[in-house]
Image (cartoon, helix red, strand yellow):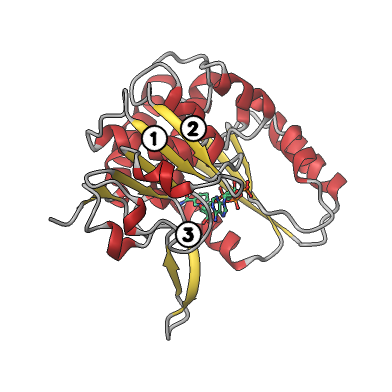
């Protein structure tokens, strides 16, 4: 029987409805509105489309949302000054600087300049450290989306063997840390694979949950998956364009093969992607509560 589809797009819709109610209640009971600024430097088309999607969602949820577009030749100092402005702006709870930044701008320096309490991407070392010790203010968005999808689909994570393919700071490392923590949707035994792993298949094949975040189109084949495993495909790889110019996307998993072996699998698109944006919104609401000392 083909695997059940873990439709992140549908789960994300559910969470957004919950967030919308929370935003209304924050407005009514406390007179506050979550504020999100997305800073886009340059005109990278993929970045433009990500930022548009983030702003659209923020707007739909009733946030105070600001899209700040800057030219590609913006100097590092000017970008730092801009971040400083939003760090001090009481209407802004979350600052998102869309990556990648143009060449010549030191990304680490920029991310370090964001006030950790407004770092809704959770990339600042303070937030990375808090995640590591199991006391996060913010969870990084893509890993948080993956974990939420596992929880809401009823996947047993506690005690599961998990193989993560990829060790980036954005996906592989944080999801590994999150799933091995104590707590709901965690308590897993996690193996992290990368380009120096001797036999990736050995690890994926014995995993109850495979998380593919390698950035390599259809890297995880059907024969690398244990029958009945749950497969989370994080990959977003552009493999061409449709006649009307839309991007054709494929994941890091050979979907047609994997769907015959796994018990559940995320599609690409419509899997992890929509969850990522939704988790950014969740973090912004959390930021608003943190800044106004509002308890859950
Ligand atoms: P990344 O920074 O390029 O990292 C890729 C990781 O995969 C690296 O750790 C690399 O190992 C490992 N890797 C690459 N080829 C491998 C191979 N053949 N065998 C084993 N490991 C291999 O990528 P990323 O930022 O984590 O993103 C991964 C994918 O997820 C991309 O397709 C990206 O577009 C997508 N993504 C999607 C979302 C979403 O919201 N859906 C969000 C973020 C990223 P080394 O460390 O040894 O080089």
Q: How many marks?
A: 3
Numbered mark located on residue 176 in the image? 2
- Whole-Å distance between the Cαs marked 2 and 1? 8 Å
Which one is in front in this view, the residue at disc 2 or the one at disc 3? Answer: 2
The answer to whether residue 34 shows anywhere in this view is: no
Look at the numbered disc 2 and give the secondary structure of its residue. helix
- Whole-Å distance between the Cαs marked 3 and 1? 21 Å
Residue displayed at 51% across by 26% down: 288
Residue 152 rendering spot, x and y as whole percentages: 26, 35
Look at the numbered disc 1 and give the secondary structure of its residue. strand
Look at the numbered disc 3 and give the secondary structure of its residue. loop
Residue 8 rendering spot, x and y as whole percentages: 32, 48
Q: Is mark 2 within 8 Å of ligand 1?
A: no
**Does residue 63 appear to the left or right of 226 in the view shown?**
right
Q: Residues within 10 Å of mark 3 (few under 14, many from 20)?
A: many
Residue pointed to by mark 1: 162
Residue pointed to by mark 3: 236
Residue 67 rendering spot, x and y as whole percentages: 60, 51
Disc on the earlier residue, 3 or 1: 1
Q: Is mark 3 within 8 Å of ligand 1?
A: yes
């Amino acid at each position: 029987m083909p695997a059940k589809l873990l439709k992140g797009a549908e789960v994300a819709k559910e969470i957004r409805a919950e967030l919308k109610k929370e935003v209304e209640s924050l407005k009514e009971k406390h007179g506050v509105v979550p504020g999100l600024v997305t800073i886009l430097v340059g005109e990278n088309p993929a970045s433009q489309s990500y930022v548009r999607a983030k702003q659209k969602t923020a707007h739909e949820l009733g946030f105070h949302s600001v899209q700040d577009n800057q030219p590609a030749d913006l100097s590092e100092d000017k970008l730092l000054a801009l971040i400083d402005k939003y760090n001090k702006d009481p209407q802004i709870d979350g600052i998102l600087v869309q990556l990648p930044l143009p060449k010549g701008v030191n990304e680490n320096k920029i991310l370090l300049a964001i006030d950790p309490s407004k770092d809704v991407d959770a990339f600042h070392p303070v937030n990375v450290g808090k995640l590591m010790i199991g006391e996060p203010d913010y969870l990084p968005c893509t890993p948080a989306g993956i974990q939420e999808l596992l929880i809401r689909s009823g996947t047993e994570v506690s005690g599961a063997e998990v193989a993560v393919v990829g060790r980036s700071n954005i996906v592989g490392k944080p999801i590994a840390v999150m799933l091995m923590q104590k707590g709901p949707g965690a308590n897993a035994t996690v193996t992290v694979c990368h380009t120096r792993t001797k036999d990736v298949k050995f690890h994926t094949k014995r995993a109850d949950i495979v998380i593919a975040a390698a950035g390599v189109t259809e890297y995880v084949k059907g024969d690398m998956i244990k029958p009945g495993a749950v497969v989370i495909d994080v990959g977003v790889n552009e493999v061409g364009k449709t006649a009307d110019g839309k991007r054709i996307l494929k994941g890091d998993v050979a979907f047609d093969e994997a769907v015959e072996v796994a018990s559940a699998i995320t599609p690409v698109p419509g899997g992890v992607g929509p969850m990522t944006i939704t988790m950014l919104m969740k973090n912004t609401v959390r930021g608003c509560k943190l800044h106004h000392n509002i308890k859950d």
